[in-house]
Every structure is written in C-alpha cells, then in structure tokens.
Amino acid sequence: MPRVEGLRSPYDKTLGGLHHLGRMLDKIRLMQAGALPEHFHRNYGLSIGLDGQLCGFLNVTFEDVEAQVKAGRTDVEVAEWIFTTGLRPNRSQTHVWNEHSRKIGWNDRVAAFNAKVKTEPGWDHLTAITSFDLIEQSEDREPPAMKG
C-alpha cells in the first residue's frame, strides 16, 4: 500500500511526545473527509488496536477524541483536551507508552494478527514483526533501526 498523504508515521512523537497520537488524529480527519483508504476502516478506533490502546492509556474514549476533532480543534487543542480530561503522562509514563507501543506485535497477542495480515494479497512481501514496522513497510517507509 502506498503512503497516504496527510498521515503521519506511528513513530512520530511530535504531538505530546507520544507515539501514534498524531497519526490517530490524522486518521480521524481523513475519515471525516472521506479520504481514509478502505483498508484502514477495519481497525479504525478499535479498542484492541493502536487507537484504542492509546485512548485506554490516556483514559479517554476514541469517540470523545473523534468528537473533539470533528469540532474543528487543532492537534494541540485536542492533545490538551486529552491531557486535561484524561491522563497527562509524566516523563516515565510517556516512556512506558512509547516503548510498549513500538513493540506491539512482537511476541504478544497481536503477533498472530500481524502474521495473518502479511498473508493477504499485496502484503505478502512485508517482513516486519511489530505493528509499527508493518505500518511503515506497508506505507513505503523504512522503519527506524532498533536501538540496542
């Protein structure tokens, strides 16, 4: 799958220092504009997916975040609403989320799902293990090297 215009990498931490937060808001905006590709729809906002896990970590619902975006709030305004309404993670909590999220799909309950995705037509060339790296490869980006 090619890269989607206006959709950040899950590795992007420019919003609140958190992996995936900016991407989640991008997906919401693209869905609202009717521009989110069909293959994203099956995982959109799912509680067991990255969106739901991040919302659970931040103690807000995806639907409430979606409503903030629909109200026309900027990324910074939505992030501040999240941090005021739910959890404003401190440095240690941010580190825990970022380390957890970038390893989803590696030797956990998501691993079987990622393996299944890689058997679908057009995805069988992907070698990624983690969900982040699967996303990166599927969007024609090179995943960053793991730090040892």
Image (tube, rainbow, N blue to C red):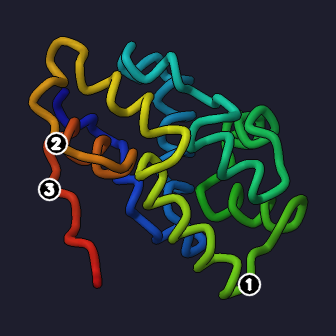
Residue assigned mark 1? 90
The label nearer to you, 3 versus 2, is 2
Give whichever of discs 1 and 2 has the lower sequence position: 1
Q: What percent of the width, then of the height, locates residue 7?
A: 36, 43
Q: Is residue 48 or residue 20 the one in the foreground?
A: 48
Answer few, some or many: residues within 10 Å of disc 3's Cα (few below 14, many 20 plus, some between 14 and 19).
few
Q: What percent of the width, then of the height, locates residue 80?
A: 75, 66
Q: Amino acid at mark 2?
A: Thr
Q: CA distance from mark 1 to mark 3?
A: 30 Å
For residue 113, side relative to residue 4 (left or right): right
Residue assigned mark 3? 142
Q: Quadrant of the N terminus?
A: top left
Q: CA distance from mark 3 to mark 2?
A: 11 Å
Q: Which mark is residue 127?
A: 2
Answer few, some or many: residues within 10 Å of disc 2's Cα (few below 14, many 20 plus, some between 14 and 19).
few
Could you say whether the residue bearing mark 2 is in a helix, strand or loop?
loop
